[in-house]
Amino acid sequence: MARRRKIYEGKAKVLFEGPEPGTIVQYFKDDATAFNNQKQGVITGKGVLNNRISEFLMMRLSETGIPTHFVRRLNMREQLVKEVEIIPIEVVVRNMAAGSFSERFKMEEGTPLPRSIVEYYYKNDELGDPLVTEEHITAFGWANPPEIDDMLSLSLRINDFLSGLFMGVGLRLVDFKLEYGRLYKDDQVRIVLADEITPDGCRLWDMKTNEKMDKDRFRRDMGSVAEAYQEVARRLGILPELGPRDLRAPLTLHDAAQ
Ligand code: TMP
Ligand code: ASP
């Protein structure tokens, strides 16, 4: 495959120009960061697992009528997606208190919330992704009111669907983060789900043991991080296709892109 132009390199993914106009290739790395890049590490095999997990979840969501950027998986670490203009907002949906919410409200992790709570964070590393309100989003022009309405209603539908899907495999969806993009087609713009849905941006707890099966294992130095991601993939029924060799780190980014 010819070398492709790198468009952007983030903490966990690299974006390349896609084969046709209006497409992007998302390459999933094994790199992990936490606390706004203060903690860095490698979770061997994470990229391969996240590529599969995000493919699976985006496809299931799309079948239920949620518009997404996902087109198809290309290989072990890459997927083709539609090019969108990313809205610089992280939409977090919470079903139970955990993480920063537990700290902010002095609420024990795992405390059920009266209803699902949606929060918005401004995507800005320098500022440490601050919590913002609709007022900030509209005043600074990050998104307009109809776009915020779309993101809110899609996020709640995604939460209902994914909570049920994970419950079916014995996992509790405690909270998760979504990103959206503007998809331009002809004269129309619409909001679609973008980025990824993986254990990097979700809290997933085993329903029987409350064991954490997500990136908190890395954030909190709990060990067995790759094993937890593998177990999530196994429960979703997508691990059998992968052999142990497939989860090894690639030699270089370019080798893996072949
Ligand atoms: P928080 O409790 O740290 O605010 O995180 C809430 C959820 O959002 C959790 O599932 C992890 C996810 N998340 C990200 O994906 N990226 C981020 O930068 C942060 C802060 C959280
Ligand atoms: N992904 C964010 C970071 O790298 C925060 C997190 O997931 O904890 O810093």
Image (cartoon, rainbow, N blue to C red):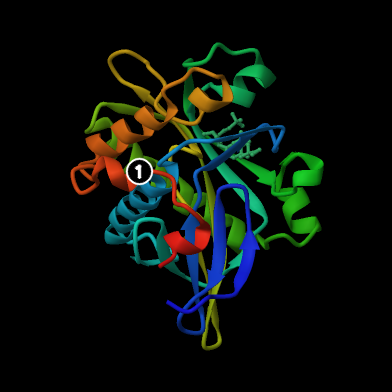
Q: Quadrant of ligand 1?
A: top right
Q: Is residue 194 visible to the viewer in this orientation of the structure?
A: no
Residue extending farthest bottom: 186
Q: Is residue 59 above or below residue 36?
A: below
- Relative image position of residue 54 (x, y in whole percent): 38, 51
- Relative image position of residue 209 (x, y in whole percent): 32, 13
Q: Quadrant of the N terminus?
A: bottom left
Residue at numbered disc 1: 247
- Relative image position of residue 3 (x, y in whole percent): 52, 76
Relative placement, left or right, of 237 versus 174 is left
Q: Nearer the viewer, residue 223 or 52?
A: 223
Q: Which secondary structure lies at badge 1? A: helix
Residue at x-position 48% and y-position 59%:
27
Residue type (three-letter) at the residue carrying disc 1: Leu
Residue at x-position 44% and y-position 64%:
257
- Relative image position of residue 175 (x, y in whole percent): 48, 32
Q: Quadrant of the C terminus?
A: bottom left
Residue at x-position 40% and y-position 63%:
79
Residue at x-position 65% and y-position 60%:
145
Q: Is residue 229 above or below residue 78?
A: above
Label 1 crowding class (10 Å Cα cut-off): few <14, some 14-19, many 20+?
some
Relative placement, left or right, of 60 versus 91 is left
